[in-house]
Image (tube, helix red, strand yellow):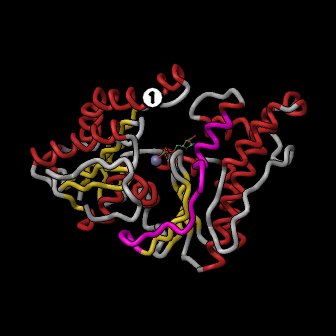
Amino acid sequence: MLTLGIETSCDDTSAAVVEDGVHVRSSVATNQDAFHAQYGGIVPEIAGRQHVALLTAAIEDAVARANTSLDAIDGIAVTRGPGLIGSLVVGVASAKALAFALSKPLYGINHLHGHIFATFLDRNGDVPRYPFLTLLVSGGHSQLVEVESATDMRVIGRTTDDAAGEAFDKSARLLGLPFPGGPEIDKLAREGSPQAIKFPRHRAEPGSLDMSFSGIKTAVRYFIESDEGKKANKADIAASFQAAIVDVLIQRLGAAFERKPYTSVVLSGGVAANSALQQALRNWGKQMNVPVFIPPPKYCTDNAAMIAAAAAHQGEAVRADPLTLSADPNLPFELLVS
Ligand code: KG4
Ligand code: ZN
């Protein structure tokens, strides 16, 4: 079964062809880094217009690289939310037009479900078994998700303020690093000491698995503005900040396991590409004897293959009426059937 995936929720224009929800036959992505450099971040209006300019070519390219044709595709999967409305509508309108013209089923996918199913991509049978726990950390979200099955998932802990990726991006900006700041901090931190500065770690209320990252970000700002901070090595600040974020995430994951055992842990979302987080999670898995699944970096950050994978795994539960599917920038996590 071949699924064409389309993902335009933020500023990456992506299309992919995935076989049986696992084998990536092609994955095409163009980013808008040139605009980031100019504006210091994502400008929603520009992101939407760029999708209009780039998406048709990305779809044609994905189909050609997969050595197939649009007629041979079995279904079309598109991100319907959450995300930037001006970006989402471009993908949804294109997917609807294709589904209508080709008489193919249309799957409206939750972007966050896509991140979770990225873990099944390009694996040879070595996949997590249900029920597993996902630590989903991206630029817009940070949450712990209990995955009972492809269509039975619930959020059991979440950030009450900034997402982890947002904290990385904002702290990177304070350090004078370009956008997106996560990969930049990751790189710089390799030359610094994670023990150099003791940034605060958020403690959860008893019984809660919620997390918070705005305190760390504020502490970084105050430190940089202090006399000590002005003399400090930037790599030490980056490494110490990163260690604080990783500590909170691993602590909350451990607390979730104390409540209930899961077969395995899946790391997903853009921040899953972080080398310190990956190392800490692998160490935790070894210590606890719990299998850990981490997708390769290209499937951690936004991509269309993960959207096709989610559609293939969720199947009929997410099939939508081609003519009524609409983009929803605030699509709730639990909503499955359109
Ligand atoms: O999942 P994603 O591509 O887009 C959203 O759905 O938000 O995540 C983007 C986020 C950005 O905040 C970016 O800085 C962060 O993921 N990120 C990283 C790394 N690579 C990407 N954060 C820390 N370390 C990285 N290596
Ligand atoms: Zn994402």
Where's residue 9, x and y in %? 38, 42
In this picture, residue 242 sits left or right of residue 264: right
Where is 278 relative to 172, above or below? below
Q: Magenta segment: does it hold 212? A: no
Q: Quadrant of the C terminus?
A: bottom left
Where's residue 43, x and y in %? 45, 29
Where is 296 relative to 192, above or below? below
Residue 190 visible, this orientation: no
**Circle 1 is placed at which residue position?**
43
Task: For mark 1, give the secondary structure.
Answer: loop
Q: Nearer the viewer, residue 37 or 160?
A: 160
For the point 27% across and 52% down, the residue is 77
For the point 32% across and 55% down, the residue is 109
Identify residue type, mark 1: Val
**Disc 1 residue: CB within 8 Å of ligand 1:** no
Where is 4 relative to 53, above or below? below
> Which residue occupies the extreme bottom position in the image?
260
Q: Quadrant of ligand 1?
A: top right
For the point 76% across and 40% down, the residue is 220
Q: Characterize the local packing of mark 1: few (<14), some (14-19) or many (20 or more) Cα atoms within 10 angstroms.
A: few
Please state the total of marks drawn on the protein image: 1
Q: Nearer the viewer, residue 334 or 27?
A: 334
Dividing the picture into quadrants, the one containing residue 236 is top right
Where's residue 298, x and y in %? 48, 44
Where's residue 319, x and y in %? 22, 61
Residue 160 visible, this orientation: yes
Q: Quadrant of the N terminus?
A: bottom left
Which region of the structure is painted magenta? 149-172
Dividing the picture into quadrants, the one containing residue 92 is top left
Dividing the picture into quadrants, the one containing residue 110 is bottom left
